[in-house]
Image (cartoon, rainbow, N blue to C red):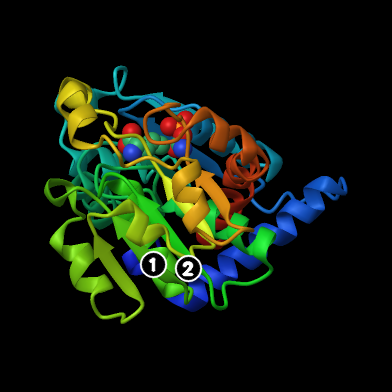
């Protein structure tokens, strides 16, 4: 594993190794056992979109590993003024040990990896959010003990979160049911992958998808960069909500995850959100541990 660009690139074994190391790093942190595995290393973090969790967890994680994180806002980099990504990649490769990038186009992240000579970590694109889904898988395994026999249900937009969840959950052996409006399905590349699995189901009925689910997950109706479509999307996604009616169809011990930020009373009700705050905020914490594991695997 040279980069973390998308879940499609990871083998089941690589996912398991990251999750095992993440569990170990979490244990060590809780027991004040230092782990300076990236002493002397630097991580550049390029943000072309806003972030709370990704920025703070990568920055803190790098510090805990003994390395140095640099926050690089694209407003201040020449890349924001049009310097080509292939030049940025070649320059930054000469200073840094790794790059985390949050941007719009997946092709930009792939180009950094192609033209640079250091590990590239995708901190969210319009296409996918692998760091989040590694933390989600870590959280599912933590609460449920294993992935065996579990069904994950995603309700909402066929967006970056849906894409990475579909691939990640199928790769670790879970059944996956996705409910999206017909006009907001995941892209062909993801559906082509998923349709190889008989335990994958795509529907436009949230009730259908939620049946007997062990894990229910949703995400905002309008992602970063889609603010102009928010009103149109509110209409298209009406009914694509995790609420008490949906929870009644799932298993009685079902857990709920949300990558955050959440829009209460849109994709999830306040009530369900607060009833499942324990899992949701453990999931947010696990960003730290999962990403530290990724950095150690790629950069040590
Ligand atoms: N879930 C997530 O990636 O959060 P941020 O946008 O705050 O980084
Ligand atoms: N789908 C959301 C995820 C935020 C973490 C977005 O791209 O804005």
One can see residue 211 in this view: yes
Ligand 1's quadrant is: top left
Which residue: 17% across, 64% down? 189
Quarter residue 297 falls in: bottom right
Please give the label number shown on residue 176.
Answer: 1
The reply, left or right, for residue 2 in relation to residue 214 is left
Q: Is residue 143 above or below residue 259?
A: below
Tell me residue 48's x, y (percent).
30, 28
Crowdedness near tag 1: few (<14), some (14–19) or many (≥20) residues, C-alpha within 10 Å = many
Q: Is residue 79 above or below residue 174?
A: above
Q: Looking at the image, do the residues carrying marks 2 and 1 touch, with CB atoms under 8 Å apart? A: yes
Q: Is mark 1 within 8 Å of ligand 2?
A: no
Task: From the image, tell me which residue sits under label 2.
Answer: 151
Q: Is mark 2 within 8 Å of ligand 2?
A: no
The reply, left or right, for residue 110 in relation to residue 51 is left
Please give the label number shown on residue 76.
Answer: none
Which residue: 32% across, 59% down? 178
Label 2, secondary structure: give it: strand
């Amino acid at each position: 594993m040279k980069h973390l660009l998308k879940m499609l690139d990871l083998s089941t074994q690589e996912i398991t190794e990251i999750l095992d190391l993440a569990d170990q790093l979490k244990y060590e942190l809780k027991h004040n056992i230092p782990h300076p595995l990236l002493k002397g290393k630097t991580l550049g973090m390029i943000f072309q979109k806003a972030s709370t969790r990704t920025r703070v967890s990568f920055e803190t994680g790098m510090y805990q590993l003994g390395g140095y994180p640099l926050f690089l806002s694209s407003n201040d980099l020449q890349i924001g003024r049009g310097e080509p990504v292939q030049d940025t990649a070649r320059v930054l490769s000469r200073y840094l040990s790794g790059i985390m990038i949050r941007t719009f186009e997946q092709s930009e992240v792939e180009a950094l990896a192609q033209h640079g000579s250091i590990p590239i970590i995708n901190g969210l694109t319009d296409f996918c959010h692998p760091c989040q889904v590694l933390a989600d898988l870590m959280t599912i395994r933590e609460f449920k003990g294993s992935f065996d026999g579990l069904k994950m249900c995603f309700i909402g937009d066929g967006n970056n979160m849906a894409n990475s969840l579909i691939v990640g959950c199928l790769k670790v052996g879970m059944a996956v049911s996705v409910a999206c409006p017909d006009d907001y399905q995941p892209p062909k590349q993801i559906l082509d992958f998923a349709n190889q699995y008989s335990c994958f189901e795509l529907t436009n009925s949230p009730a259908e998808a939620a049946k007997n689910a062990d894990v229910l997950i949703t995400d905002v109706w309008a992602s970063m960069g889609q603010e102009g479509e928010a009103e149109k999307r509110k209409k298209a996604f009406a009914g694509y909500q995790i609420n008490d009616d949906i929870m009644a169809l799932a298993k009685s011990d079902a857990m709920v995850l949300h990558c955050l930020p959440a829009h209460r009373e849109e994709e999830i009700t306040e009530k369900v959100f607060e009833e499942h705050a324990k899992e949701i905020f453990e999931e947010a914490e696990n960003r730290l541990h999962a990403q530290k594991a990724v950095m150690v695997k790629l950069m040590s």
